[in-house]
């Protein structure tokens, strides 16, 4: 997966609470197991005027400029709740989202984000609302900056907000490695242990 370090980008505010994975990608849009080709179904129930059509709803924010180029989403509490479908994260990633800022996330969704190179940041609702308000006056000029090494979010007005993520998630995103790839970095240690163990407990082998 792609490494994450710093990002300065347009942010799209979708300020609703409890946006579940079926809203992120409806089940009717999940016609394949592959990660490729899912972005057309992203927020399909809101992006398109009719189910199954591709006629865009002009009132939905991601159908408007400059939000079509957004790499950051702002949203309400419990983003990504509902089913554990990883397709939701795949669709967001393919569309170009690299970071989501919300007061809270569905636990499985948050883990899936990290394992697919998307940074989930939890900030207080008042802060997220303020970021959304700052963006609306000039979305292209009022970008948000993310610094993962320093664990900070910088608002358009220059205010910096700290955030925290688990150390293992921090390492995965910075290195662009999923949990399997990080484990594989320990291959020499694992092989050395197995060799020692064969000598000390040969009856197990």
Image (cartoon, helix red, strand yellow):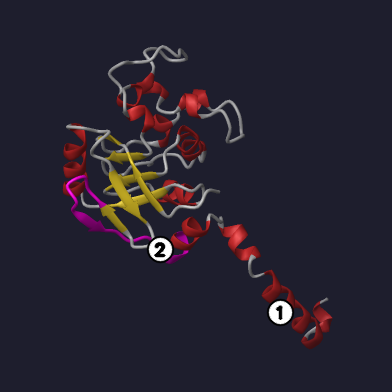
Mark 2 closeness class: few <14, some 14–19, many ≥20 residues within 10 Å: few
Which region is colored magenta? 154-169
- In the image, residue 168 lies in the stretch drawn in magenta: yes
Tell me which residue sits at (56%, 55%) in the image: 178
Above or below: residue 136 compared with residue 152: above
User: Under tag 1, what secondary structure?
Assistant: helix
Tell me which residue sits at (38%, 38%) in the image: 71
Mark 1 closeness class: few <14, some 14–19, many ≥20 residues within 10 Å: few
Q: Residue furthest bottom?
A: 200
Q: Position of residue 203 (x, y in %)?
A: 83, 82
Q: Left or right: where does residue 150 sit relative to residue 22?
A: left
Tell me which residue sits at (58%, 25%) in the image: 31
For marks 2 and 1, the one nearer the N-term is 2
Judging by the rendered image, the residue that carries numbered circle 1 is 193
Q: Left or right: where does residue 33 sit relative to residue 80?
A: right
Q: Position of residue 148 (x, y in %)?
A: 38, 57
User: Under tag 2, what secondary structure?
Assistant: loop
Quick one: 135 or 84, which is closer to the camera? 135
> If the image is split into quadrants, where does the C terminus sit?
bottom right
Q: Left or right: where does residue 120 sit relative to residue 157?
A: right
Q: Which mark is residue 166?
A: 2
Look at the numbered discs 2 and 1 and tell me whether their residues touch, using CB distance below 8 Å.
no
Above or below: residue 187 compared with residue 121: below
Q: Position of residue 145 (x, y in %)?
A: 30, 49
């Amino acid at each position: 997966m792609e490494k994450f370090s710093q990002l300065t980008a347009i942010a799209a505010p979708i300020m609703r609470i409890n946006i579940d994975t079926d809203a992120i990608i409806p089940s009717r849009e999940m016609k394949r197991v592959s990660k490729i080709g899912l972005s057309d179904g992203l927020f399909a129930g809101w992006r398109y005027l009719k189910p199954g059509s591709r006629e865009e709803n002009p009132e939905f924010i991601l159908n408007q400029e400059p939000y079509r180029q957004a790499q950051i989403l702002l949203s309400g509490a419990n983003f990504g709740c509902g089913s554990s479908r990883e397709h939701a994260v795949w669709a967001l990633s393919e569309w170009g989202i690299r970071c989501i800022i919300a007061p809270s996330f569905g636990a499985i969704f948050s883990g899936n984000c990290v394992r697919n190179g998307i940074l989930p940041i939890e900030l207080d609702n008042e802060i997220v609302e303020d970021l959304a308000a700052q963006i609306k006056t000039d979305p292209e000029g009022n970008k948000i900056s993310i610094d993962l090494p320093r664990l900070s979010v910088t608002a358009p007005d220059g205010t910096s907000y700290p955030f925290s993520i688990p150390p293992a998630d921090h390492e995965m995103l910075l290195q662009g490695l999923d949990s399997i790839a990080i484990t594989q970095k320990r291959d020499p240690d694992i092989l050395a242990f197995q060799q020692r163990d064969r000598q000390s407990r040969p009856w197990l082998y």
